Image (cartoon, rainbow, N blue to C red):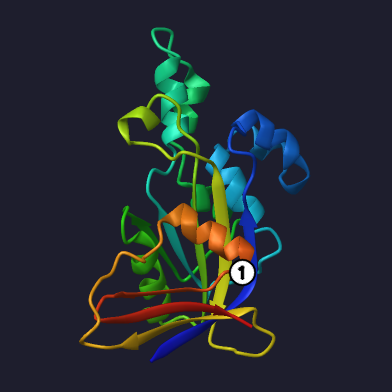
Amino acid sequence: MIERFIHRLQVEWPAADETVADARVRLAAKFPRTALRRMTHLGLLVGSALDGTPLGPDDAVVYATTFAETRALEDFLGSFPTASPLLFQTSIHPGAVQQVLIGRQQPVARLWPLAGRRRLVEQGLLTALLEPASRVAFVGGEERGTWMLEHGMAGARPFAFAAMLTRDAARSEGRVTFSVDDRQGCDERCPSLPVFAEALGARRPLRWGGAGGEIAVTWA
């Protein structure tokens, strides 16, 4: 069995219809004024979830998202035929967690950006469990889409989470484990990214089979 312990967990779960303008007002105190205008909605949510979480150059970051800055791309395309230079800049901005690290001028040992759907959470947790750094920040989230949501190419609601995973059990909030079991198949209990974020916020345990074993999230 391999394991890591959950420390410094924060979940951003705003109103389902929150816009980037709403987030800039709500989270203004957490960011420099010059950064607020340039950050995407997802960047603001991820930055808030990481607020107060110390990261060092020896730490690693695993970042999980299915649709990334889809809303920023929607807004830019919506500005046609008079394309907005500002919205273009936002649409090609670095990813949400990179916006935060760049703003902090914070180097890390490794950044693992992952994108997927059905088993994204499983892939992210396994990456964090296998990462050699002693401290790994597992970060994820989505923006809320509009017309791209109708085509299955955007998230249905905004959210973000950040959990520091370490090998230190002392004062931990919970634990992530992977137990090898060749008889265990990939079952359908693997949560989607929003279901996982909601479970983290509620400190709800999760357990499912996948990748030749059983993955579990339990709480102290």
Residue 126, percent from left and from top: 36, 74
- Side of 184 relative to 5 (left or right): left
Q: Where does label 1 land, which residue?
A: 203
Residue 17: x %, y % from top left: 59, 32
Q: Image height check: is 166 above or below 1?
A: above
Q: Which of 171 and 15 is in front in this view?
A: 15
In percent of width and height, residue 197 lies at: 53, 58
The x and y percentages for residue 169 are 60, 90
Tell me if 191 is positioned left or right of 164 in this view. Answer: left
Residue 116 shown left or right of residue 82 in the figure: left
Report the quarter where the N terminus lies: bottom left
Q: Name the residue at the right extreme.
A: 29
Image position of 157 with respect to 217: above or below: above
- Name the residue located 39 percent from the left edge and 32 percent from the top edge: 149
CA neighbours of label 1 inside 10 A, class few (<14), some (14 to 19), many (20+): some
* Residue at 54% from the left image edge and 76% from the top image edge: 165
Q: Which residue is drawn at 26% across and 76% down?
A: 211
